[in-house]
Amino acid sequence: MSLDANPTAAANALPPAASSSFRARFVKVFRSNPTTAAGIVVIAVLLLVAAFAPVLAPYDPYATDPRFALKPPSAEHWFGTGTFGEDIFSRVVYGARLALLIAFGAVGIALVIGSLLGAIAGFYGGFVGSAIMRVVEVMQAFPSFILALAIAGALGPSFTNLIIAVAITNIPIYAHLMRVGVLNHRQSEYALASIALGASSWRTLFRHLIPNSLGPIFVQATLQPGYAILTAAGLSFLGLGVRVPEPEWGLMVAMGSSRIISGQWWLSLFPGVAIMIAVMGFNLLGDGLRDLFDPHAS
């Protein structure tokens, strides 16, 4: 029988999954590292708050009432009210939706584009690979926030443009990780067997090389949402993110920053704490997953 007679047999060349070892490491990591469990809890709570925002928020986040402007926290308004009488608690709750949309949207776009570029650069190399990596390196020459600032300024302030700006700054990270992974696996037995059995280069790349290079990508993808939220908050603080009256946490901090000196501390404190908790949750989760996917994890 010729090798071409069974082109789908390449899948059998993949190394067997050590599922029992992975499960054992999973249990060990999450038992020995309670901070990872804390990160999971934080992210789960954040997702629940975003999903049930209409139920949890006692007021319309866009409603204003000048009669109750700048009221401190009370039983009626748990986080106080804003400059126009808006309920801060309701806006913080709805802000979780925008934060998660920015985080997952920006990371998802960067992951797909960056991984694809890195996979092509690592697998084909040559002029195409060099050109891709030179562009990636030029992007990395700029501090990520400065690059996001320039992109957001060029595109203009809007929610969509904010996601695009944050996503573009994260593309180089995934491109480098995927390129390294593909280079490491390109000469592996299962990749060579796939090519020998008649599989096309694209099938070998997408069926074998990319899936086996996703471990570090997944770990980075759990860390990046926190940075995406911080970057988006910074851009909104500078006026290059979403527009008023959207309940975005960075924008809320900016709107309240000028009133801290006059005693209205709650305007910036509560959305700032929300940013801190969300970033902390993603970082704790990412640290745990890094230990989980590390084959040398103790």
Image (spheres, rainbow, N blue to C red):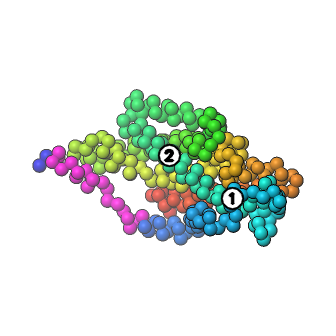
Name the residue at 15% across, 48% down.
Answer: 5
Image position, residue 219 (x, y; %): 51, 54
Q: Which residue is mark 1?
A: 61
Image position, residue 64 (x, y; %): 75, 57
Task: Give SS at disc 1.
Answer: loop
Give the prevailing secondary structure in the magenta stretch.
Answer: helix
- Residue at the limit of the structure toward the left, as seen here: 1
Image position, residue 275 (x, y; %): 67, 56
Residue 41 can be seen in this image: yes
Q: Residues within 10 Å of mark 1 (few under 14, many from 20)?
A: many
In the rendered structure, which segment of residues is drawn in magenta?
3-22
Answer above or below: position of 31 versus 202. below
Tag shown at residue 109: 2
The number of numbered badges drawn on the structure is: 2
Picture quadrant of residue 169: top right
Q: Assess whether residue 9 is covered by the magenta stretch.
A: yes
Q: Is residue 43 left or right of residue 112?
A: right
Name the residue at 57% across, 63% down.
Answer: 51
Task: Give SS at disc 2.
Answer: helix
Image position, residue 79 (x, y; %): 76, 63
